[in-house]
Amino acid sequence: MSRRAEPSREDIERLVAAARSVRRRAYAPYSGFHVGAAVLAEGRIYRGANLENASYPLSVCAERNAVAAAVAAGRRRIEAVAVVAGDEEPTPPCGGCRQVLHEFGPGMLVVSETTAGRRARWRLDELLPAAFEASSFVRP
């Protein structure tokens, strides 16, 4: 797979700042685990916060909400995602979010930061090797 050029340091800082700011808007009354995410899609930033529901399976992660905002704006390619959460260690996207992100940029940069400023970074294809994709469908 060919890799795109990595987003600039300035883009990454803007992306993390957007995730940090939207985290305050998370709706997490059950777990208390507030997460903010932002995606860089075709040069623009789209934000999302986690949204819990009393029926846990209906909850939606911040990363998927950020992807939905980008898709609603007509974007179809994501270069990077930033996640900010209040854990002691940087929190990467969950498995479901990894799969959704893969749809829009398998080689994207993933940056995670704690509220204390500790940061980690990965490539999505490293976090989700052998992802399910269009070529995975068995066709008659």
Image (cartoon, rainbow, N blue to C red):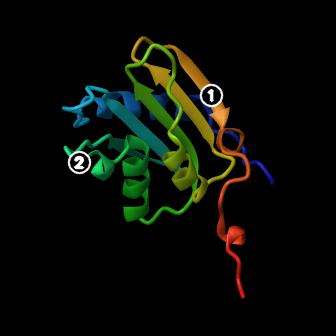
- Residue ID for mark 1: 121
Query: Which percent across, then down, holds residue 24?
Result: 25, 29
Residue 2 shows in the view: yes
**Residue 129 versus residue 16: which sits nearer the camera?**
129
Query: Which percent across, then down, holds residue 109?
Result: 63, 39
Q: Going by the image, does 17 lie left or right of 132?
A: left
How busy is the neighbourhood of tag 2: few (under 14 within 10 Å), some, or many (20 plus)?
few
For badge 1, the amino acid type reads Arg
Residue that protrudes farthest toward the bottom in the picture: 140
How busy is the neighbourhood of tag 1: few (under 14 within 10 Å), some, or many (20 plus)?
some
Give the mark nearer the N terminus: 2 vs 1. Answer: 2
Query: Which percent across, then down, holds residue 128?
Result: 66, 45
For badge 2, the amino acid type reads Ser
Query: Which percent across, then down, holds residue 104?
Result: 57, 57
Q: Residue at x 22, y 37 (%)?
A: 27
Judge whether 59 appears above or below 115 on screen.
below
Q: Residue at x 60, y 28 (%)?
A: 9
**Residue 12 versus residue 88: which sits nearer the camera?**
88
